[in-house]
Amino acid sequence: MLKLENLDVAIAETGEIRLKNINLTIKPGELHVLMGPNGSGKSTLANTILGSERYKIVRGKILLDGEEIQNLPPEERVKKGIFVSFQSPPEISMVNYMRFLKSVLEAHGLDPDEKRIKGILRKVGLDEEFLKRDVNKGFSGGEKKRAEMAQLLLLKPSYTVLDEPDSGVDVDSLKFIAGTINEILSRKAGVLLITHSARILSQLPSNFMVHILVDGEIRATGGPELVHRIEKEGFGS
Ligand SMILES: Nc1ncnc2c1ncn2[C@@H]1O[C@H](COP(=O)(O)OP(=O)(O)OP(=O)(O)O)[C@@H](O)[C@H]1O
Ligand SMILES: [Mg+2]
């Protein structure tokens, strides 16, 4: 169980509070959807779960199966089974994608088997040729998102935060991304999906929970009906 308990989070550099009293519990196999206006703090929350040093937890806890992890560095959190996909995945020069994926697997104590890597790349609809290219360099927006899904399938984390994996992707990419999320949910991973659109949700199990973040606070929690209300009425802010 991944539990956020009474979290207040500030921008490390300025001390400005960006998230207030966040409480959220994600159990194995559960899909939670986080929606909210631009600038409401969704990516801040994703980065806080990962342990980015740009953000400082000023109150509250992050618990992974009962263990406090809010003071652990990102690599330790990742080793414990937390995966956070970036809204804008970074480009890495001079490192080809195969070498990168192998080193990620090795860092997790997993077998850096080339055959498996190639199989998973096919699964997310990326050509093997991508493995020869620098990480994310010149990848299109949709290709970057698919590449993140490949990492997700390789690493099999217990809890995953996906920051707008569906933004700017075409219908085919969307299918691969939804397929990946369905696969990890069926393997009992817990998922927090940040999105602006109901489009991806129609391809996912319909028993998800929705949380609406406005101005750094969760203002409403409910089922899929909340998404339809937001689509019709907006966030009311
Ligand atoms: N490192 C930082 N330094 C200064 N301001 C920051 C920093 N990180 C986030 N912010 C500010 O905090 C607010 C929340 O940003 P965040 O990226 O979490 O929003 P978001 O909900 O993900 O928005 P979007 O839907 O546009 O992705 C914004 O006003 C942003 O400018
Ligand atoms: Mg964001």
Image (spheres, grey):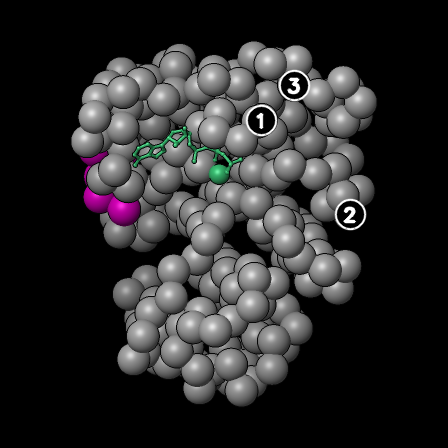
Residue 38, percent from left and from top: 53, 31
Specify whether 11 is left or right of 44: left
Question: Which stretch appears magenta?
Answer: 69-74
Label 3 beta carbon less than 8 Å to ligand 1: no
Label 1 beta carbon less than 8 Å to ligand 1: yes
Going by the numbered disc 2, the residue's amino acid type is Gln
Mark 2, residue position:
203
Q: Residue at x 65, y 18 (%)?
A: 235
**Chief secondary structure of the magenta portion:** loop
> Nearer the observer, disc 3 or disc 2?
3
Going by the numbered disc 3, the residue's amino acid type is Phe
Q: Residue at x 44, y 82 (%)?
A: 133
Q: Is residue 204 magenta?
A: no
Q: Earlier in the sequence, mark 3 or mark 2?
A: 2
Q: CA distance from mark 3 to mark 1?
A: 7 Å
Residue 57, percent from left and from top: 26, 24
Q: Earlier in the sequence, mark 3 or mark 1?
A: 1
Mark 3, residue position:
235
Q: CA distance from mark 3 to mark 2?
A: 23 Å
Specify whether 99 is left or right of 76: right
